[in-house]
Amino acid sequence: MAATARDVVVLGGGISGLTLAYFLRQALPKIVADATRIRVLDASATPGGWVQTAKRDDFLFEEGPRGFRPSRNGAEMLRLVEQLKLQDQMQAVDPAAQARYILRGGKVEKVPTTLLEALRWPLSMAVARAALHELSVKPGTTEDESIYQFISRRFSPLVAERLLDPMASGIFGGDIRKLSIRSCFPMLVDLEKKHGSVVKGMLLGGSKGEDTLLDGTNKSAFVKKHEKSVSVSFTDGMGTLISALADTINDDPMADLQLNTKVTRLEVHGHNNASSKGPRFVVESKDPTSGEILEPIRASHVFSTIPACYLSPVVKDTAPGLAEALNEIQFVDMGMVHVGYNEEVLTTDGFGYLIPTSEREKVLGVVFDSNTFPVQNKSNMQTRLSVMSGGAHFREVASLPKGELERHALEALKRHLGISQKPDYVRALAITNGIPQYHVGFGQTLQRIEKQAARNTPGLFLGGNSFYGIGLADCVTHSKQLALKFAKTISS
């Protein structure tokens, strides 16, 4: 018996959309997969979304995420690397780059990793007192609270402002007084709930990781070997993963990767009619450069991995309630300046440094790219630095001239690291709506979005970093969950 033909459209050709297309093809039973056409639509001229590797003037830089964390849910990404046969190209962070630094009083200080370093660290006594205090603090009773409220309550305001603030700025580009502890750092909430104390939970150790993956298969030796790594990338950058995923779509006779395709409207038909047959959706789009209206695409199912702020106008006519709920999620713009030298100008080891908001700097932190993945350096003498800016405390970053961003970056490198040499390469870029902000009460916002989608657009599935985690591993893991759930529904 022939399977029912299905047309699946994936909105967004970033890491979430590309992996979703890949996992759908893997998860569907063969008879169903052979009858399912998968189209991935993206407004850009190149796939990958924010994951873009640039090679210019012999310098390699990441224009978005520079790697992924294999720990926790990163096992699914490691398995993906294995499936795409990219193991030989994958690179773990160099052991010499494990150290982390934080700016304090305008000076870069190493976060201690040994007892001796801890004894010399100026903040050691204050942090130790806060940790002892935390052991006796009763668990909170509120449904959700800000990162600042949680850490101040359990530890101290100093720990919140000096340690969690720069971490949250580096990951989320956000304000710890507005970001949700439950949505941003759920592990800390779980430790409080399970052990009554974050410190006690950490001392007792976390639960043993699962030996199986989402699809029920056992973790391979490769996955087990690398899932404790701090961060991994590839010899030629994260673009390696994007190219491999795009190739799988281009090589699939029942799949298409349509670039330069900006989705403008999503029509839903027959969702209130149980006897309705045929496509439920009509996807309207245009070429974002020429403005040409493209041929509408009929689809039985749609998976959206584009940011919530871009999905909202697409569904506002068909599902105004969903559009309104999507608009509750705010985004921040991010800036990045790549600075390269054909000489060794960096005297500090480690991964890089982060900057607390209290330092009132124009930058969020600096990543020592030439230290973290030295295999990507053109020569042993090359120095590569990425200076991050923007976020909740520097919202005008996307509107500033590129020259001003470059000036802020070079001045910061001179003040903090003593680097005064003229760089051989400088390039500034701004990312508009780069990172979603998981605000206090985000869980309730997500519930409203899911309820509106189920009620008004059944057959529309949500993925990407707007909802279930902003990290690459979060996005890939959720894409696999969506694909497996869809395959199970179709099969039943």
Image: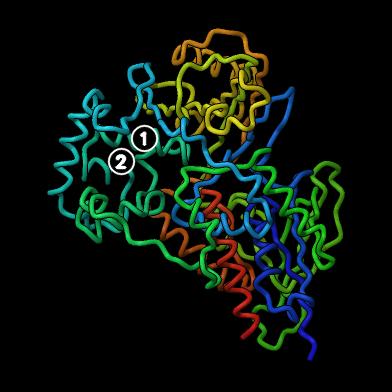
Q: Secondary structure at mark 2?
A: helix
Under mark 1, the amino acid is Asp
Q: Residue furthest front?
A: 221
Q: Work out which quarter of the rendered image holds the N terminus and state it.
A: bottom right
Compared to residue 413, the image places residue 150 above or below, namely: below
As drawn, the label of residue 405 is none
Residue at 79 percent of width and 77 percent of height: 35
Sequence-wise, which precedes: disc 2 or disc 1? Answer: 2
Q: Secondary structure at mark 1?
A: helix
Residue at 15 percent of width and 48 percent of height: 135
At which x and y percent is residue 185? 37, 50
At which x and y percent is residue 477? 54, 60
Residue 316 in view here:
no
Q: State the residue position of label 1.
A: 165
Q: Work out which quarter of the rendered image holds the C terminus and state it.
A: bottom right
Query: Are the two marked residues, 2 and 1, in contact with CB atoms closer than 8 angstroms?
Result: yes
- Distance (Cα) linking label 2 and label 1: 8 Å
Residue at 45 percent of width and 66 percent of height: 211
Residue at 61 percent of width and 66 percent of height: 461
Q: State the residue position of label 2.
A: 148
Badge 2 crowding class, 10 Å Cα cut-off, few under 14, some 14 to 19, many 20 or more, is many
At which x and y percent is residue 267? 72, 66
Q: Nearer the viewer, residue 171 or 299?
A: 171
Compared to residue 453, the image places residue 380 above or below, namely: above
Q: In the picture, residue 204 is in which quadrant?
A: bottom left
At which x and y percent is residue 151? 27, 43
Compared to residue 452, the image places residue 436 above or below, namely: above
Residue 184 in view here:
yes
Q: Nearer the viewer, residue 221 or 353?
A: 221
